[in-house]
Image: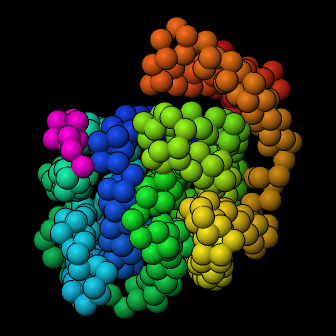
Amino acid sequence: MHENVRTNVIVNLTRTIVLTILSFITFPFVCRVLGDETIGLYTWANTFVYYFLILARISIPNFAVRECVRVRDDKKALSKKAQEFFILQAITTALSFVLMLTFVFSVDALFSEREIIFLLSVNFLAGVFSFEWIFVALEKHFYMAMRSIVVLMISAISIFVFVQYPEDIYLYALCTVGVTILTVASNLIILPRYISFKKEGKYDFRPYIKPLLVLFSISVVLALCNQSDAFILGFLDADKTEVGSYSVGLKGIEIIISITTSLGIVFMPRAAHYFQMDDKRFFNNLTRYSMNITLFITIPAIAAMTTLSEPITRLISGSYLSGGDFQESWTILAVLASMMLTYSLGDIIYTQVLIPMKKEKIYLYTILIGAVADIALSVVFGLFLFREHPAIGVALATAATDAFIIAFLIAKTWRWTAKAIFNFNTLKIAVLGVVVAVLCYFIGPLLFDVFMERFASNYTNAYIAELVSVVAIAGIVYIVGLSLLKEDLVHSFVKKRQE
């Protein structure tokens, strides 16, 4: 594997981990200040806006990356592509916003929440000017990492300063929207170095229509599949407290998923380049390498989060006593933990195998079936089987659907993914994952009791100390164990340091 790929992976992992830490610091604070009902309202409104964000993008960013990679060494051709994709996205964004306005002012259930919806919609209105896909295609990973860290730090500081009461939900929304605005401003300052806004010949949108229709369909169906759980739960739970618990339980899952899927920024343009050059050896090696990283991260994460779900969610939500706010969140986290693996592998198959090979329709049909199944199961489980705890029912439906999706995708791409997933190296990671689960299950409660005495029943300090200690112990055992077993990823770093 080329050294610059390894460097880009490290840069993106560092970026995502820092952003995750910032998010992990601010989210518990927001949960305690706003409470489960207000957090539930924010999550529900954000989910509603997200549907129109998907309509606005119609998957242009993914398609633009693939097309821009082909001409990234020709500034004129790249500039022309950038202008064409910007015009397309500006049109779709305007249409999406008009559609959102129609819904907000015609559906009574949405009318009362229009202020928060309009504020959050700035995300996709401003996002049209970000040109983030240009930086991905050009592999400007260091710039994107530094920019994101600075912007998220500004947002985090703003949240701590301005969000103090439950009615500050609008200030919280403004702080989150500010991330997009600052990102856009930074990108527009840097962008002229790489492209020109001077018109380079006649625009031709015809070659984009057919592939964009497929990718657009994927985006819509994927949004239904990914966001339907919280949206449906919002209708099943009138006061949105269950949505609040669900969002806390999902937060731990999103942390790991954001880390693994962020690697697509590195691997997708490379995969498209290798496949275009008919370099099947590097294409297959890249797939195996990305799968290896994903398994290396997600398997111990599943082991730790399922066994430590209660202290994790209590720390995130600030709900330290039995009952009270967010009381179902730890069960939800344990149920959804498998999604860290299933969703991450599915994302790799889509972005690094199917998109470069122009076989997006396989993903479309799979996600379409999954979306229908997810919605149906969420309603049945949430409304009937788990009527007293609809959030748990929806979580079970979501986890089951995601497991079906990844099984089907692996079956359809067996030729390119089987050896990357099912191999002796994966078995090594799985064995150490079981060791991590056992350590966390038995050591966690013991350390919590010790730290409760040490910190005079200060729950916050005790939970933090417990999690840090357990993760540190399990992490050392995990890395040392993989090193002794000569697992590919760990062994490659050890070997490189020895050289």
Residue at 63%, 81% in the rendered image: 376
Residue at 44%, 25% in the rendered image: 460
Q: Is residue 189 left or right of residue 213?
A: left
x, y percent for residue 128: 24, 69
Q: Is residue 395 visible?
A: no
Relative to 183, residue 427 above or below: above
Which image quarter is the C terminus in?
top right
Q: Is residue 87 left or right of residue 416?
A: left
- Of 486 and 139, nearer the camera is 486
Residue at 32%, 71% in the rendered image: 49
- Of 140 and 236, nearer the camera is 236
162 drawn magenta: yes
Q: Quadrant of residue 310?
A: top right
Magenta stretch secondary structure, dominant: helix
461 drawn magenta: no
x, y percent for residue 265: 46, 53
x, y percent for residue 178: 19, 52
x, y percent for residue 429: 77, 37
Which residue range is magenta in the image?
A: 157-166
- Of 446 and 423, nearer the camera is 446
Q: Quadrant of residue 40?
A: bottom left
Which image quarter is the N terminus in?
top right
Residue at 61%, 40% in the rendered image: 309
Type of colouring: rainbow
Q: Is residue 429 left or right of residue 496?
A: right
